[in-house]
Amino acid sequence: MPASASFADLLEGPALGLWWGVPFLGLLITIAVAQTVWPARWERHYGTLTGLWIIAAVVPLIARFGTNGLTALVRLLLLEYAPFAVSILALYIIAGGIHIRSRMSGHPAENALLLALGTLASGVLGTPGSTLLFLPVLLKSNRWRRHRVHSVLFLIFVVCNIGGGFSPIGPPLLIGYLKGVPFLWTVRMMLLPTAFVSALLIAAYFALDSLLLFRREDPEARASHQQEHDVIRLEGATNLLLLCGAIGLLIFCGSWQTGVAVPLAGVTIPAPDLLRLVGLSALAAASLALTPKGIRAANEFSWLPMKEVVVIFAGIFATILPILAILEAGANGALSGLIRMVTGTDGQPINWAYFAASGFLSSFLDNAPTFLVFFNAAGGDPVALTGPNATTLVAISAGASFWGGLTYIGNAPNFMVRTMSEQRGVRMPTFIAYLAWSAAVLLPTFALTAWVFFP
């Protein structure tokens, strides 16, 4: 088997049945049920439960495919999961060393402005970096309020997901850039859909908060909060430089084309991936060494949110491996019906179907391979997809970027926000309750977006 063999090659993707996805589905159901029925036990035992589903996925895989199965697993861990975990952890450490003291009072207009700024920052800093900067500000400015969960949920919708849609700073749109889609083409073509969806959601937030919830708050509590925050100040400015360095490193490594690679455990790690791992680790170490402890204490910095994110997503990556192989098989795999849905009987792309299909899969699966699957299904030619078929590529890009907010696991920052918010006393919805919230808010928004942009 060649070193460049895909998951579909290693695991015989065209022959895999959908039942190989049972461990992934089991993990999702476990998260949903345990968070709803046994939240306290889930907090204590999520590592054990996740580990059991990893075993249920990995053992049959290795038993069936032997060395190829082990190679596919190691490749997934080293080339997909490790960069993900290190990137999220490094950004969490660096952003956790930046403390913003503001005079924001939790007023609906101020919260809406904060969401708008965070959405804009997501296209520049990436969704994890922007989330980690703006979430603490939102939580602190609203900590006097009884009704604040909705503010966190809308932050997940727009800052953790929608805002990342207008630039190829990170996955999934970085994949298109690596495939030959010009950087500025993505910015130009995705700016209007991103602004449209963001404006709808922020307007909906403002209406909900100002007309229904804010008037129920205690005005005396608000006055007391404002007296505590009469100074605007940025602390930990060194970490701003480290954060810019981390974003620059991610962009450089994502665009560096080289054949140099380092062999490790039977897998060749490309030089850009290795540089990213080492560079981000060094920046995180510098942040830990240079940041005064008082700043992290003011941010209520804790390792617990990262622990849960790293463990849960280890389970998601491990159990999702067979599904990735099926997706890579494309029209020859068990999900061929989904691929055929996006093409009409005349052979022309159905753009709204591309938007919905890439979006729905991205709300449960990793959005980077989902983008790549539909990019290839649309022909895989960057010249055609940025020319006569530009609307199709915009539909794929919007689906893969926007729909991640539909579930907690649709994008790593979602789960991170949930855990960090609960650490700070915000009682977040369970997996199922969150899905009800997101479906009620996002699905009508996406239906309108499809009608306007992808008829």
Image (cartoon, rainbow, N blue to C red):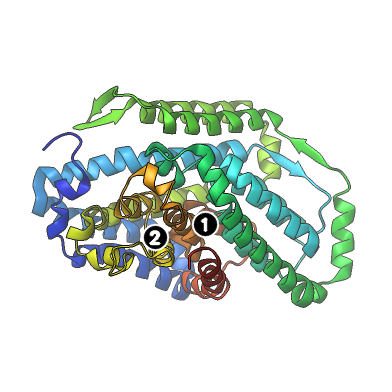
Number of labelled discs? Answer: 2
Seen from this angle, which residue lies furthest top? 260
In the image, is 256 to the left or to the right of 240? left
- Report whether residue 422 is seen: no
N-term-proximal mark, 1 vs 2: 2
Residue 33: horizontal and vertical position, in percent? 41, 73
Q: Nearer the viewer, residue 186 or 345?
A: 345
Q: Nearer the viewer, residue 304 or 446?
A: 446
Residue 146: horizontal and vertical position, in percent? 73, 70
Query: Are the two marked residues, 1 and 2, in contact with CB atoms closer than 8 angstroms?
Result: no
Which amino acid does the dot numbered 2 rest on? Ser
Question: In the picture shown, does residue 184 fall above or below 334?
Answer: above
Q: Can you identify the residue that label 2 sits on? A: 358
> For the residue labelled by badge 1, is the local secondary structure a helix, a strand or a loop?
helix
Q: Residues within 10 Å of mark 2 (few under 14, many from 20)?
A: many
Residue 399 occupies quadrant: bottom left
What residue is rendered at 58% in x and 66% in y? 428
> For the residue labelled by badge 2, is the local secondary structure a helix, a strand or a loop?
helix
Cα separation, mark 1 vs mark 2, equals 18 Å
In the image, is 272 to the left or to the right of 64? right
Residue 100: horizontal and vertical position, in percent? 74, 42
Q: Can you identify the residue that label 1 sits on? A: 414
Question: In the picture shown, does residue 180 fall above or below 348?
Answer: above
- Report whether residue 298 is seen: yes
